[in-house]
Amino acid sequence: MLERLLAAPNRWLLDHVEPEWVDYVVSNTMTDFNRWFNGFLWTYDLKALVESIEDEAPGVKTFVLRPNQHWRGFEPGQHIELEVQINGQAQRRCYSPSHRPNGRVSITVKRKAGGHVSNWLHDHLCTGMQVGMKHPRGRFTWQGQHKLLMLCAGSGITPCHAMVSSMLLRPLDQRPDVRVMAQFRDASQVIFRQHLQDWHTQGVPVTLALSGEQGEAGRLNAQRILHDCPDVNERDIYLCGPEGFMAQMMDELKSLGVDPKRVHTERFEMAPPQPVADRAFDVDGAQVFFEHVNARLTLTAADQGKTLLQLAQDHGVNLESGCGQGACGTCKLTVHDGQACGNVMGTTVYLCTAYPGSRHLVLGA
Ligand SMILES: Cc1cc2nc3c(=O)[nH]c(=O)nc-3n(C[C@H](O)[C@H](O)[C@H](O)COP(=O)(O)OP(=O)(O)OC[C@H]3O[C@@H](n4cnc5c(N)ncnc54)[C@H](O)[C@@H]3O)c2cc1C
Ligand code: FES
Protein backbone atom coordinates (compact mmCIF):
# COMPACT_ATOMS: atom_id res chain seq x y z
CA MET A 1 0.00 0.00 0.00
CA LEU A 2 2.75 2.43 1.10
CA GLU A 3 4.76 1.32 -1.93
CA ARG A 4 2.00 2.41 -4.29
CA LEU A 5 1.32 5.68 -2.41
CA LEU A 6 4.97 6.67 -2.75
CA ALA A 7 5.13 5.75 -6.45
CA ALA A 8 4.16 9.22 -7.72
CA PRO A 9 6.53 11.26 -5.47
CA ASN A 10 9.39 8.82 -6.17
CA ARG A 11 8.80 9.16 -9.90
CA TRP A 12 8.65 12.94 -9.65
CA LEU A 13 11.93 13.04 -7.73
CA LEU A 14 13.74 10.78 -10.20
CA ASP A 15 12.42 12.86 -13.11
CA HIS A 16 13.62 16.15 -11.62
CA VAL A 17 16.82 15.39 -9.71
CA GLU A 18 20.04 13.97 -11.21
CA PRO A 19 20.49 10.30 -10.19
CA GLU A 20 23.96 11.09 -8.77
CA TRP A 21 22.38 13.60 -6.35
CA VAL A 22 19.62 11.19 -5.34
CA ASP A 23 22.31 8.56 -4.76
CA TYR A 24 24.40 11.00 -2.70
CA VAL A 25 21.52 12.07 -0.45
CA VAL A 26 20.16 8.55 -0.06
CA SER A 27 23.50 6.97 0.82
CA ASN A 28 24.09 9.63 3.47
CA THR A 29 20.67 9.09 5.08
CA MET A 30 20.45 5.29 4.87
CA THR A 31 18.63 4.76 8.18
CA ASP A 32 16.48 1.74 9.06
CA PHE A 33 13.42 4.00 9.10
CA ASN A 34 14.11 5.39 5.61
CA ARG A 35 14.71 1.88 4.28
CA TRP A 36 11.41 0.73 5.73
CA PHE A 37 9.49 3.85 4.73
CA ASN A 38 10.74 4.15 1.15
CA GLY A 39 12.75 1.12 0.13
CA PHE A 40 12.54 2.09 -3.53
CA LEU A 41 14.95 5.01 -3.11
CA TRP A 42 16.66 4.12 0.19
CA THR A 43 18.41 1.09 -1.16
CA TYR A 44 21.70 0.12 -2.78
CA ASP A 45 19.82 -2.20 -5.14
CA LEU A 46 18.50 -1.56 -8.63
CA LYS A 47 14.69 -1.54 -8.58
CA ALA A 48 11.97 -0.30 -10.93
CA LEU A 49 8.45 1.05 -10.60
CA VAL A 50 5.77 -0.25 -12.92
CA GLU A 51 4.53 2.92 -14.57
CA SER A 52 2.05 1.59 -17.11
CA ILE A 53 0.94 -1.65 -18.73
CA GLU A 54 0.01 -2.06 -22.38
CA ASP A 55 -1.71 -4.97 -24.13
CA GLU A 56 0.32 -6.01 -27.19
CA ALA A 57 -1.54 -9.12 -28.32
CA PRO A 58 -3.55 -11.86 -26.59
CA GLY A 59 -1.28 -13.17 -23.83
CA VAL A 60 1.38 -10.52 -24.42
CA LYS A 61 1.80 -7.42 -22.24
CA THR A 62 4.33 -4.61 -22.20
CA PHE A 63 5.32 -3.27 -18.76
CA VAL A 64 6.78 0.25 -18.80
CA LEU A 65 9.28 0.57 -15.96
CA ARG A 66 10.87 3.56 -14.24
CA PRO A 67 14.17 2.34 -12.74
CA ASN A 68 15.55 3.99 -9.60
CA GLN A 69 18.75 6.05 -9.31
CA HIS A 70 21.03 2.99 -9.73
CA TRP A 71 20.07 2.44 -13.39
CA ARG A 72 22.96 3.01 -15.82
CA GLY A 73 21.24 2.13 -19.10
CA PHE A 74 21.63 -0.84 -21.42
CA GLU A 75 22.66 -1.79 -24.91
CA PRO A 76 19.68 -2.77 -27.09
CA GLY A 77 19.54 -6.56 -27.34
CA GLN A 78 20.85 -7.13 -23.79
CA HIS A 79 18.62 -8.69 -21.13
CA ILE A 80 17.82 -7.82 -17.55
CA GLU A 81 17.02 -10.29 -14.80
CA LEU A 82 13.74 -9.33 -13.16
CA GLU A 83 13.08 -10.38 -9.57
CA VAL A 84 9.57 -10.63 -8.15
CA GLN A 85 8.23 -12.05 -4.90
CA ILE A 86 5.67 -14.80 -5.47
CA ASN A 87 4.15 -16.30 -2.29
CA GLY A 88 7.09 -14.90 -0.30
CA GLN A 89 9.71 -16.45 -2.58
CA ALA A 90 12.02 -14.51 -4.89
CA GLN A 91 11.66 -15.61 -8.52
CA ARG A 92 13.98 -14.45 -11.28
CA ARG A 93 13.53 -14.46 -15.05
CA CYS A 94 15.28 -12.68 -17.91
CA TYR A 95 13.58 -10.18 -20.22
CA SER A 96 14.92 -8.11 -23.12
CA PRO A 97 14.17 -4.42 -22.51
CA SER A 98 13.45 -1.68 -25.04
CA HIS A 99 14.22 2.00 -24.59
CA ARG A 100 11.36 4.36 -23.75
CA PRO A 101 11.60 8.16 -23.58
CA ASN A 102 12.53 9.98 -20.34
CA GLY A 103 14.63 7.28 -18.71
CA ARG A 104 11.96 4.58 -18.93
CA VAL A 105 12.41 1.07 -20.26
CA SER A 106 9.83 -1.51 -21.19
CA ILE A 107 9.73 -5.27 -21.14
CA THR A 108 7.28 -7.28 -23.22
CA VAL A 109 6.24 -10.56 -21.65
CA LYS A 110 4.46 -13.42 -23.35
CA ARG A 111 2.44 -15.76 -21.16
CA LYS A 112 3.91 -19.23 -21.12
CA ALA A 113 1.35 -22.03 -20.66
CA GLY A 114 1.83 -23.21 -17.06
CA GLY A 115 4.73 -20.75 -16.63
CA HIS A 116 5.30 -19.61 -13.06
CA VAL A 117 6.54 -16.05 -13.50
CA SER A 118 5.10 -14.88 -16.84
CA ASN A 119 1.56 -15.70 -15.67
CA TRP A 120 2.14 -13.98 -12.34
CA LEU A 121 3.36 -10.85 -14.12
CA HIS A 122 0.25 -10.84 -16.30
CA ASP A 123 -2.19 -11.51 -13.46
CA HIS A 124 -0.67 -9.66 -10.50
CA LEU A 125 1.83 -6.99 -11.51
CA CYS A 126 0.06 -3.61 -11.45
CA THR A 127 1.05 0.00 -11.96
CA GLY A 128 2.74 1.52 -8.88
CA MET A 129 4.26 -1.82 -7.82
CA GLN A 130 8.01 -2.37 -7.61
CA VAL A 131 10.20 -5.08 -9.08
CA GLY A 132 13.84 -5.95 -8.45
CA MET A 133 16.27 -5.91 -11.34
CA LYS A 134 19.84 -6.88 -12.09
CA HIS A 135 21.98 -4.68 -14.32
CA PRO A 136 21.76 -5.59 -18.03
CA ARG A 137 23.92 -8.36 -19.41
CA GLY A 138 24.49 -10.20 -22.64
CA ARG A 139 26.20 -9.80 -25.98
CA PHE A 140 23.24 -10.21 -28.32
CA THR A 141 23.84 -6.65 -29.44
CA TRP A 142 24.61 -4.88 -32.71
CA GLN A 143 28.36 -4.96 -33.28
CA GLY A 144 28.39 -2.21 -35.94
CA GLN A 145 27.99 -4.50 -38.98
CA HIS A 146 26.62 -2.80 -42.11
CA LYS A 147 24.06 -5.38 -43.23
CA LEU A 148 21.77 -7.26 -40.86
CA LEU A 149 18.89 -9.69 -40.91
CA MET A 150 16.73 -10.02 -37.80
CA LEU A 151 15.19 -13.49 -37.88
CA CYS A 152 12.73 -14.04 -35.05
CA ALA A 153 9.56 -15.75 -33.91
CA GLY A 154 7.04 -15.11 -31.11
CA SER A 155 8.47 -13.32 -28.07
CA GLY A 156 11.90 -13.69 -29.71
CA ILE A 157 11.12 -10.43 -31.44
CA THR A 158 11.82 -8.45 -28.23
CA PRO A 159 15.65 -8.07 -28.48
CA CYS A 160 15.35 -7.44 -32.25
CA HIS A 161 12.72 -4.78 -31.51
CA ALA A 162 15.09 -3.07 -29.07
CA MET A 163 17.92 -3.10 -31.62
CA VAL A 164 15.91 -1.94 -34.65
CA SER A 165 14.11 0.79 -32.67
CA SER A 166 17.41 2.24 -31.51
CA MET A 167 18.96 1.98 -35.00
CA LEU A 168 16.08 4.03 -36.38
CA LEU A 169 16.90 6.83 -33.93
CA ARG A 170 20.32 7.25 -35.55
CA PRO A 171 20.95 9.73 -38.39
CA LEU A 172 20.23 8.14 -41.79
CA ASP A 173 23.90 7.85 -42.79
CA GLN A 174 24.75 5.99 -39.57
CA ARG A 175 22.05 3.34 -39.84
CA PRO A 176 22.85 -0.17 -40.95
CA ASP A 177 20.94 -1.83 -43.78
CA VAL A 178 18.56 -3.93 -41.69
CA ARG A 179 15.79 -6.32 -42.71
CA VAL A 180 13.35 -8.14 -40.41
CA MET A 181 11.73 -11.54 -40.93
CA ALA A 182 9.32 -12.44 -38.12
CA GLN A 183 7.11 -15.48 -37.68
CA PHE A 184 3.94 -15.62 -35.57
CA ARG A 185 1.17 -18.18 -35.34
CA ASP A 186 -1.55 -15.89 -36.75
CA ALA A 187 -2.33 -12.22 -37.31
CA SER A 188 -3.74 -11.77 -33.78
CA GLN A 189 -0.46 -13.00 -32.25
CA VAL A 190 1.74 -10.39 -33.94
CA ILE A 191 3.76 -8.51 -31.30
CA PHE A 192 4.72 -4.85 -31.96
CA ARG A 193 2.35 -4.77 -34.96
CA GLN A 194 2.32 -0.97 -35.20
CA HIS A 195 6.11 -0.77 -34.91
CA LEU A 196 6.56 -3.35 -37.65
CA GLN A 197 4.34 -1.26 -39.94
CA ASP A 198 6.23 1.93 -39.03
CA TRP A 199 9.61 0.28 -39.67
CA HIS A 200 8.49 -0.64 -43.14
CA THR A 201 7.76 3.00 -43.93
CA GLN A 202 11.12 4.01 -42.39
CA GLY A 203 13.08 1.82 -44.79
CA VAL A 204 13.31 -1.43 -42.83
CA PRO A 205 11.69 -4.15 -44.97
CA VAL A 206 9.61 -6.51 -42.82
CA THR A 207 8.46 -10.00 -43.78
CA LEU A 208 5.60 -11.29 -41.63
CA ALA A 209 5.14 -15.05 -41.74
CA LEU A 210 1.94 -16.45 -40.22
CA SER A 211 2.64 -20.12 -39.66
CA GLY A 212 -0.80 -21.13 -38.34
CA GLU A 213 -2.88 -19.28 -40.94
CA GLN A 214 -0.99 -20.05 -44.11
CA GLY A 215 0.30 -23.52 -43.20
CA GLU A 216 3.67 -24.51 -44.66
CA ALA A 217 3.56 -21.53 -47.02
CA GLY A 218 3.42 -19.25 -43.98
CA ARG A 219 6.55 -20.62 -42.33
CA LEU A 220 9.97 -19.15 -42.73
CA ASN A 221 12.30 -21.51 -44.56
CA ALA A 222 15.36 -21.34 -46.81
CA GLN A 223 13.27 -20.63 -49.90
CA ARG A 224 11.35 -17.77 -48.28
CA ILE A 225 14.49 -16.29 -46.75
CA LEU A 226 16.27 -16.32 -50.11
CA HIS A 227 13.21 -14.87 -51.87
CA ASP A 228 12.78 -11.92 -49.48
CA CYS A 229 16.45 -11.50 -48.63
CA PRO A 230 18.54 -12.53 -51.67
CA ASP A 231 21.74 -11.11 -50.13
CA VAL A 232 21.37 -13.19 -46.93
CA ASN A 233 24.98 -14.38 -47.31
CA GLU A 234 26.24 -10.81 -46.98
CA ARG A 235 24.32 -10.15 -43.76
CA ASP A 236 24.93 -10.76 -40.07
CA ILE A 237 21.92 -12.63 -38.76
CA TYR A 238 20.38 -12.10 -35.34
CA LEU A 239 18.26 -15.14 -34.51
CA CYS A 240 15.86 -15.44 -31.58
CA GLY A 241 12.73 -17.48 -30.96
CA PRO A 242 11.45 -20.77 -29.57
CA GLU A 243 13.97 -23.63 -29.49
CA GLY A 244 12.36 -25.53 -32.42
CA PHE A 245 12.30 -22.40 -34.58
CA MET A 246 15.95 -21.65 -33.85
CA ALA A 247 17.09 -25.19 -34.60
CA GLN A 248 15.15 -25.14 -37.88
CA MET A 249 16.54 -21.72 -38.86
CA MET A 250 20.11 -22.90 -38.15
CA ASP A 251 19.52 -25.77 -40.62
CA GLU A 252 17.90 -23.50 -43.21
CA LEU A 253 20.77 -20.99 -42.98
CA LYS A 254 23.30 -23.80 -43.26
CA SER A 255 21.56 -25.03 -46.42
CA LEU A 256 21.90 -21.49 -47.82
CA GLY A 257 25.65 -21.58 -47.15
CA VAL A 258 25.54 -18.82 -44.51
CA ASP A 259 28.80 -18.55 -42.56
CA PRO A 260 27.93 -19.75 -38.99
CA LYS A 261 30.19 -17.02 -37.58
CA ARG A 262 27.66 -14.51 -38.90
CA VAL A 263 24.76 -16.05 -37.01
CA HIS A 264 24.22 -14.49 -33.57
CA THR A 265 21.74 -16.29 -31.35
CA GLU A 266 19.73 -15.58 -28.20
CA ARG A 267 17.94 -18.45 -26.47
CA PHE A 268 14.94 -17.80 -24.24
CA GLU A 269 14.68 -21.38 -23.03
CA MET A 270 17.08 -23.84 -21.54
CA ALA A 271 18.67 -26.10 -24.15
CA PRO A 272 17.62 -29.76 -24.10
CA PRO A 273 20.09 -31.99 -22.18
CA GLN A 274 23.15 -32.96 -24.25
CA PRO A 275 24.25 -36.59 -24.76
CA VAL A 276 26.89 -37.64 -22.20
CA ALA A 277 28.99 -39.27 -24.96
CA ASP A 278 29.92 -35.76 -26.14
CA ARG A 279 31.86 -35.25 -22.91
CA ALA A 280 34.01 -38.37 -23.21
CA PHE A 281 36.85 -36.37 -24.85
CA ASP A 282 40.16 -36.74 -22.93
CA VAL A 283 41.12 -33.22 -21.78
CA ASP A 284 44.52 -33.95 -20.17
CA GLY A 285 47.03 -31.56 -21.85
CA ALA A 286 44.35 -29.81 -23.93
CA GLN A 287 44.40 -26.02 -24.19
CA VAL A 288 41.58 -23.53 -23.92
CA PHE A 289 42.29 -19.91 -24.84
CA PHE A 290 39.83 -17.18 -23.76
CA GLU A 291 40.91 -14.63 -26.34
CA HIS A 292 38.87 -11.68 -25.06
CA VAL A 293 40.60 -11.76 -21.65
CA ASN A 294 43.92 -13.14 -22.97
CA ALA A 295 43.82 -16.18 -20.66
CA ARG A 296 45.24 -19.54 -21.71
CA LEU A 297 44.44 -22.71 -19.72
CA THR A 298 46.35 -25.97 -19.94
CA LEU A 299 44.04 -28.67 -18.68
CA THR A 300 44.95 -31.67 -16.55
CA ALA A 301 43.26 -35.01 -15.91
CA ALA A 302 41.58 -33.38 -12.88
CA ASP A 303 39.68 -31.11 -15.29
CA GLN A 304 37.90 -34.04 -16.94
CA GLY A 305 34.13 -33.55 -17.11
CA LYS A 306 34.18 -29.88 -16.06
CA THR A 307 32.21 -27.28 -17.97
CA LEU A 308 34.11 -24.48 -19.69
CA LEU A 309 32.87 -22.07 -17.01
CA GLN A 310 34.10 -24.36 -14.22
CA LEU A 311 37.44 -24.71 -16.01
CA ALA A 312 37.82 -20.94 -16.21
CA GLN A 313 36.90 -20.50 -12.54
CA ASP A 314 39.18 -23.33 -11.34
CA HIS A 315 42.10 -21.84 -13.32
CA GLY A 316 41.53 -18.38 -11.82
CA VAL A 317 39.85 -16.76 -14.82
CA ASN A 318 36.85 -14.67 -13.88
CA LEU A 319 34.22 -14.68 -16.63
CA GLU A 320 30.75 -13.18 -16.75
CA SER A 321 28.00 -15.65 -15.87
CA GLY A 322 24.44 -15.76 -14.55
CA CYS A 323 22.09 -18.70 -13.96
CA GLY A 324 24.75 -21.41 -14.39
CA GLN A 325 22.17 -23.71 -15.99
CA GLY A 326 22.13 -22.75 -19.65
CA ALA A 327 19.03 -20.56 -19.34
CA CYS A 328 20.08 -16.90 -19.39
CA GLY A 329 22.83 -16.70 -22.02
CA THR A 330 25.05 -14.40 -19.96
CA CYS A 331 28.06 -16.70 -20.26
CA LYS A 332 27.90 -17.05 -24.06
CA LEU A 333 31.11 -16.86 -26.09
CA THR A 334 31.95 -17.59 -29.72
CA VAL A 335 34.23 -20.37 -30.98
CA HIS A 336 37.07 -18.80 -32.94
CA ASP A 337 39.05 -22.00 -33.44
CA GLY A 338 38.62 -25.66 -32.49
CA GLN A 339 35.45 -27.24 -31.17
CA ALA A 340 33.22 -27.17 -28.11
CA CYS A 341 30.47 -29.65 -27.28
CA GLY A 342 27.41 -29.72 -25.07
CA ASN A 343 25.27 -26.57 -25.07
CA VAL A 344 26.42 -25.10 -28.38
CA MET A 345 24.33 -23.41 -31.05
CA GLY A 346 26.24 -22.78 -34.27
CA THR A 347 29.43 -21.08 -33.10
CA THR A 348 27.81 -19.84 -29.87
CA VAL A 349 28.89 -21.67 -26.73
CA TYR A 350 27.07 -21.52 -23.38
CA LEU A 351 30.13 -21.92 -21.14
CA CYS A 352 28.17 -23.01 -18.06
CA THR A 353 26.80 -26.08 -19.85
CA ALA A 354 29.42 -26.75 -22.55
CA TYR A 355 32.73 -28.64 -22.62
CA PRO A 356 35.95 -28.60 -24.62
CA GLY A 357 35.51 -30.66 -27.81
CA SER A 358 39.04 -30.50 -29.24
CA ARG A 359 42.58 -30.33 -27.84
CA HIS A 360 42.89 -26.71 -28.91
CA LEU A 361 39.94 -24.41 -28.37
CA VAL A 362 39.86 -20.64 -28.83
CA LEU A 363 36.85 -18.72 -27.50
CA GLY A 364 36.13 -15.03 -27.63
CA ALA A 365 33.45 -12.37 -27.44
C1 LIG B 1 18.14 -13.76 -22.39
C2 LIG B 1 16.65 -14.00 -22.25
C3 LIG B 1 15.78 -12.98 -22.63
C4 LIG B 1 14.40 -13.20 -22.54
N1 LIG B 1 13.55 -12.20 -22.94
C5 LIG B 1 12.22 -12.42 -22.91
C6 LIG B 1 11.31 -11.41 -23.34
O1 LIG B 1 11.71 -10.31 -23.71
N2 LIG B 1 9.98 -11.68 -23.31
C7 LIG B 1 9.50 -12.91 -22.87
O2 LIG B 1 8.28 -13.10 -22.87
N3 LIG B 1 10.34 -13.87 -22.43
C8 LIG B 1 11.67 -13.65 -22.43
N4 LIG B 1 12.51 -14.62 -21.96
C9 LIG B 1 11.95 -15.85 -21.36
C10 LIG B 1 11.66 -15.58 -19.87
O3 LIG B 1 12.88 -15.43 -19.15
C11 LIG B 1 10.91 -16.75 -19.18
O4 LIG B 1 11.59 -17.95 -19.43
C12 LIG B 1 9.47 -16.82 -19.67
O5 LIG B 1 8.78 -15.63 -19.30
C13 LIG B 1 8.76 -18.03 -19.05
O6 LIG B 1 8.90 -17.97 -17.66
P1 LIG B 1 7.85 -18.69 -16.68
O7 LIG B 1 8.33 -18.53 -15.31
O8 LIG B 1 6.49 -18.23 -16.99
O9 LIG B 1 7.94 -20.20 -17.16
P2 LIG B 1 8.57 -21.44 -16.34
O10 LIG B 1 8.31 -22.64 -17.19
O11 LIG B 1 8.05 -21.48 -14.96
O12 LIG B 1 10.10 -21.12 -16.35
C14 LIG B 1 10.77 -20.94 -17.61
C15 LIG B 1 12.25 -21.24 -17.47
O13 LIG B 1 12.82 -20.47 -16.44
C16 LIG B 1 13.94 -21.17 -15.95
N5 LIG B 1 13.91 -21.13 -14.51
C17 LIG B 1 13.11 -21.82 -13.69
N6 LIG B 1 13.40 -21.48 -12.43
C18 LIG B 1 14.39 -20.57 -12.50
C19 LIG B 1 15.11 -19.84 -11.52
N7 LIG B 1 14.87 -20.00 -10.23
N8 LIG B 1 16.05 -18.95 -11.95
C20 LIG B 1 16.30 -18.78 -13.26
N9 LIG B 1 15.65 -19.46 -14.22
C21 LIG B 1 14.71 -20.34 -13.83
C22 LIG B 1 13.87 -22.56 -16.44
O14 LIG B 1 14.87 -22.68 -17.43
C23 LIG B 1 12.53 -22.68 -17.08
O15 LIG B 1 12.60 -23.46 -18.24
C24 LIG B 1 13.90 -14.43 -22.04
C25 LIG B 1 14.78 -15.43 -21.62
C26 LIG B 1 16.14 -15.22 -21.74
C27 LIG B 1 17.08 -16.30 -21.30
S1 FES C 1 23.38 -19.59 -19.62
FE1 FES C 1 23.17 -18.53 -17.74
S2 FES C 1 25.22 -18.55 -16.99
FE2 FES C 1 25.32 -19.80 -18.75
Image (cartoon, rainbow, N blue to C red):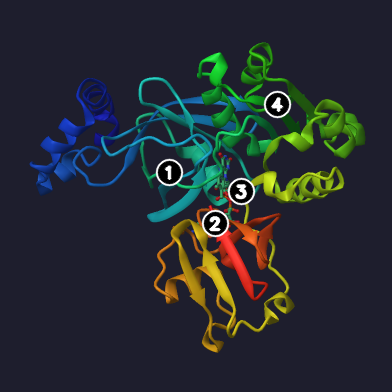
Residue 25's image quarter?
top left
Q: Are marks 1 and 3 in contact (CB under 8 Å)?
A: no
> Which amino acid does the dot numbered 4 rest on?
Arg
What residue is disc 4 on? 179
Residue 19, percent from left and from top = 23, 31
Proximity of marks 4 and 2: CB atoms separated by less than 8 Å? no
- Distance of label 2 from label 1 (alpha carbons): 20 Å
What secondary structure is marked by label 4?
A: strand
At a point 46% along the width and 38% down the height, the residue shown is 124
Residue 136 marker: 1
**Viewer can see residue 296:** yes
Labels 3 & 4 near each other (Cβ < 8 A): no
Which mark is drawn over residue 323?
none
Mark 3, residue position: 268
Q: Earlier in the sequence, mark 1 or mark 4?
A: 1
Q: CA distance from mark 3 to mark 2?
A: 22 Å
Could you say which quadrant of the image residue 22 lies in?
top left
Which quadrant of the rendered structure holds the N terminus? top left
Closer to the camera, 68 or 165? 165
* Residue at image mark 2: 364
Label 1 – label 3 distance at C-alpha: 15 Å
Dot 3, crowdedness within 10 Å: few (<14), some or many (≥20)? many
- Residue type pointed to by label 3: Phe
Q: Nearer the viewer, residue 203 or 6?
A: 203
Q: Where 222 sits versus 64, above or below?
A: below
In the image, is the residue at mark 3 within 8 Å of ligand 1 by its beta carbon? Answer: yes
* Near-viewer residue (162 or 106): 162
Answer above or below: position of 4 versus 362. Answer: above
Q: Nearer the viewer, mark 3 or mark 4?
A: 4
